[in-house]
Image: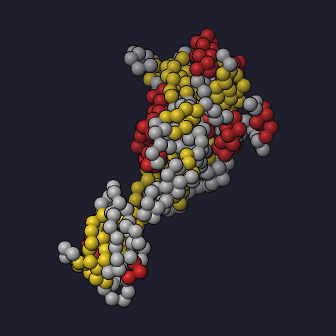
């Protein structure tokens, strides 16, 4: 396990007072080690979990050639320049094989999913033929040989990987696992993340308002973000800015969790004890990131009771908490969960307004993406981009990402947008 200093030496151009967003993710990729404990769970319990090993298909899917349509099955070699007349000699239903034989000039009425009778390779849909009880006519040009037939193993062949280690299981993957007849899959154990807010000015719900104090929104926002990610959340509430309470909270969190997230107390010059306690108890770096919002951040590890927990000390402002989580903490936690890291898919949309931006930092503007009458995607900001305006995150459906080297944006310019769907 590498120390903060060792990772810093490896990272080209590392400057804790001026890190780019890309350098932050590169650093965290070196800091975070995936969990190694695994367990077998049913498909019902596997949603959002990362596979601990490849899933090898024990069967071919589909297990036999079958019809993709309700129609009539026949030998496609009989198709020619003229309409094809065929006698109907039976009906093949899904779930069992039709036992008869089919001669030239004959066909079988067949249902979707039914096994293709031997020697037949083409299905003409019901609506394309002229049919009587015992005879059909296939018009010219409506099908070609081999049409509307699903081949054995077309989806998967027995012995081939169906899903790969590190893949996060979504709804479609659960269905695929079940289609293979597998009652369980091997996944990495669920990661535990402890979270608490810090500060004497933070009120918990139920406390009476007082001058200079604010109710804690970050705790609930982070809870939602973590729950969406599929980790086990350990809610430790609000911890006052008092050394003994902070020490107890950090030690308790490190003893039971794989990662610790705090909000508040990491800005330069703050008159509290959070930063000092982080440094006292762990191997921690304090950063100023070239980004907006969310410039201050702390990262590192805290060890307790033979365990080592990754620490993410986030800013205190609500929007900065969400942005730093989405940009940095979420991908780091996915790596911790054993999932194969993937870059966020950025949607491109035309800016509906001018945006001022200086090169040299990454900016995340709250945006609303819509589709114009001509089908073109457009995005506009939610207005006030202050890092304390939580309402703007509710109104937005994505973050406009203005990259490190990017300058001013003119109306109509294409910009990248990190969509919220599935993340928050």
Q: How is the image coloured?
A: secondary structure
Q: Is residue 160 above or below residue 297?
A: below
Q: In which quarter of the image is residue 108?
A: bottom left
Q: Residue at x 41, y 40 (%)?
A: 394
Measured as percent of width and height from the top left, residue 192 is found at: 55, 27
Which residue, as the protein is rendered here, is positioned at the far bottom?
81
Asked if residue 200 shows in the view, the reply is yes
Which residue, as the protein is rendered here, is positioned at the far top?
244
Q: Which residue is drawn at 44% across and 57% down?
A: 62
Measured as percent of width and height from the top left, residue 73 is found at: 34, 71
Quarter of the image for the N terminus: give it: top right
Asked if residue 382 shows in the view, the reply is no
Which residue, as the protein is rendered here, is positioned at the far front?
100
Question: Left of 224 or right of it: where is 9?
Answer: right
Measured as percent of width and height from the top left, residue 414 is found at: 53, 60
Residue nearest the observer in this picture, 91 or 404? 91
Total marks drawn?
Answer: 0
Measured as percent of width and height from the top left, residue 377 is found at: 44, 60
Q: Which residue is drawn at 29% across and 79% down?
A: 86
Residue nearest the observer in this picture, 256 or 413? 256
Q: Quadrant of residue 6?
A: top right
Residue nearest the observer in this picture, 129 or 287? 129
Q: Residue at x 37, y 62 (%)?
A: 115
């Amino acid at each position: 396990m590498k120390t903060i200093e060792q990772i810093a030496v490896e990272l080209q151009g590392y400057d804790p007072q001026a890190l780019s967003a890309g350098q932050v993710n590169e650093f965290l990729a070196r800091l975070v080690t995936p969990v190694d404990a695994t367990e077998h769970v049913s498909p019902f319990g596997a949603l959002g979990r990362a596979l601990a090993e490849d899933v090898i298909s024990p069967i071919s899917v589909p297990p036999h050639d079958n019809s993709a349509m309700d129609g009539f099955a026949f030998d496609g070699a009989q198709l020619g320049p003229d309409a094809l007349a065929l006698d109907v000699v039976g009906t093949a239903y899904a779930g069992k094989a039709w036992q008869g034989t089919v001669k030239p000039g004959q066909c079988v009425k067949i249902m979707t999913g039914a096994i293709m009778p031997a020697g037949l390779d083409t299905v003409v849909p019901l609506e394309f033929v002229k049919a009587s009880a015992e005879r059909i006519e296939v018009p010219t040009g409506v099908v070609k040989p081999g049409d509307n037939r699903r081949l054995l193993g077309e989806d998967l062949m027995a012995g081939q990987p169906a899903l790969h280690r590190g893949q996060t299981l979504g709804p479609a993957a659960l269905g695929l696992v079940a289609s293979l007849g597998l009652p369980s899959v091997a996944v990495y154990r669920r990661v535990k993340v402890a979270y608490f807010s810090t500060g004497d000015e933070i009120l918990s719900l139920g406390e009476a308002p007082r001058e200079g104090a604010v109710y804690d929104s970050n705790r609930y926002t982070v809870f939602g973000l973590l729950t969406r990610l599929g980790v086990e959340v350990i809610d430790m509430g609000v911890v006052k800015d008092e050394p003994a309470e902070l020490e107890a909270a950090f030690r308790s969190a490190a003893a039971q969790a794989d990662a610790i997230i705090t909000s508040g107390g990491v800005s330069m010059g703050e008159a509290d004890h959070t930063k000092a306690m982080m440094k006292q108890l762990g191997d921690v770096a304090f950063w100023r990131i070239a980004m907006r919002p969310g410039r201050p951040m702390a990262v590192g590890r805290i060890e307790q009771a033979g365990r080592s927990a990754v620490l993410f000390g986030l800013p205190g402002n609500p929007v900065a908490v969400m942005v730093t989580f989405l940009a940095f903490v979420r991908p780091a936690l996915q790596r911790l969960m054993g999932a194969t890291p993937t870059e966020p898919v950025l949607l491109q949309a035309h800016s509906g307004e001018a945006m001022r931006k200086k090169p040299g930092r990454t900016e995340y503007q709250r945006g609303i993406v819509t589709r114009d009458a001509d089908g073109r995607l457009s995005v506009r900001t939610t207005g006030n981009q202050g890092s304390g305006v939580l309402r703007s995150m509710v109104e937005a459906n994505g973050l406009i990402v203005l990259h490190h080297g990017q300058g001013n944006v003119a109306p109509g310019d294409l910009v990248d947008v990190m969509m919220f769907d599935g993340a928050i």
